């Protein structure tokens, strides 16, 4: 954390803390240092299986909003303790990164409920310039509202690369458009 404040001109940062049981406190310290990285364009962080809880995850999302130059973001929060309400709060901070072109977020093996997905989708709508979108929310606690979430993702006009996983099968943009068209035809 403290070392990052001296790296104000840093444009690429890739850190791996996977399996570190101190992931939550490390994330909290790192979050406090983010504001100093105003030139950061590419951020990749791996906090897989690091005991990150929902409140720290949400606070991290809020801190991301200070990284206005960010173009590429890859975050791995596989197997932590992040709930749906905190995913929505995280999305609120994420939504302010309007220069973002590529987003990869892995929150598989967390307690994300299907009911929070449409809210998360609304929070990230300002990311209209995203071309590559990969979201892994694979083990949603329920299947409700997933189709609404998928329809919200179709509002990203430039999205052409990446997959969305909110259950067993990953879907790309064409798959989601096809499902949306099938539902529209039956209504």
Image (tube, helix red, strand yellow):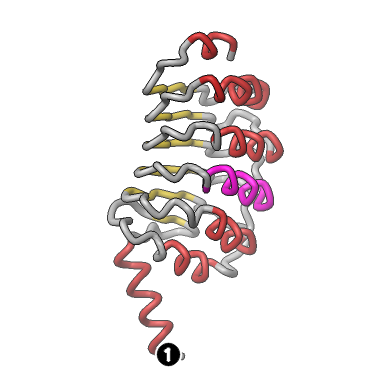
Q: Secondary structure at mark 1?
A: helix
Q: Say which residue label 1 marks.
A: 186
**Residue 144 in picture, x, y percent from top left:** 59, 69
Horizontal relation, residue 167 to residue 144: left or right: left
Is 18 left or right of 134, judged from the image as shown?
A: right
Taking the image as shown, residue 133 lies to the left or right of residue 88, namely: left
In magenta segment, residue 91: yes
Q: Is residue 48 positioned above or below 173 on the image?
A: above
Residue 167 position (above or below residue 105): below
**Image location of residue 55, percent across then percent down:** 71, 38
Query: Eyeballing the image, is 20 above or below 59?
Result: above
At horizontal 47% and vertical 65% (from top left) the residue drawn is: 152
Nearer to me, 71 or 81? 71
Q: Position of residue 98 (x, y in %)?
A: 44, 45
Magenta residues, start to end: 83-95
Q: Is residue 155 magenta?
A: no
Q: What's the residue at 39%, 49% (across, down)? A: 134
Q: Is residue 1 above or below residue 136?
A: above
What residue sits 42% from the left and 36% below the top?
74
Assign the N terminus to one quadrant of the image.
top right
Q: Residue at x 68, y 34 (%)?
A: 56
């Amino acid at each position: 954390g403290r070392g990052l404040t001296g790296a104000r001109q840093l444009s690429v940062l890739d850190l791996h803390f996977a399996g570190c049981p101190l992931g939550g406190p490390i994330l909290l310290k790192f979050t406090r240092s983010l504001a100093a990285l105003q030139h950061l364009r590419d951020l990749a962080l791996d906090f897989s299986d690091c005991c990150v809880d929902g409140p720290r995850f949400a606070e991290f999302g809020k801190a991301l909003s200070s990284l206005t130059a960010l173009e590429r973001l890859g975050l791995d929060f596989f197997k932590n303790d992040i709930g749906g309400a905190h995913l929505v709060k995280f999305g609120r901070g994420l939504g302010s990164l309007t220069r973002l072109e590529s987003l990869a977020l892995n929150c598989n093996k967390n307690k994300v409920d299907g009911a929070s997905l449409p809210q998360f989708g609304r929070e990230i709508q300002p990311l209209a310039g995203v071309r590559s979108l990969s979201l892994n929310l694979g083990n949603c606690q329920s299947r409700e509202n997933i189709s609404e979430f998928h329809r919200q993702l179709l509002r990203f006009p430039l999205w052409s690369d990446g997959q969305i996983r909110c259950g067993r099968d990953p879907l790309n943009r064409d798959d989601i458009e096809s499902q949306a068209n099938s539902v529209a035809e039956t209504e």
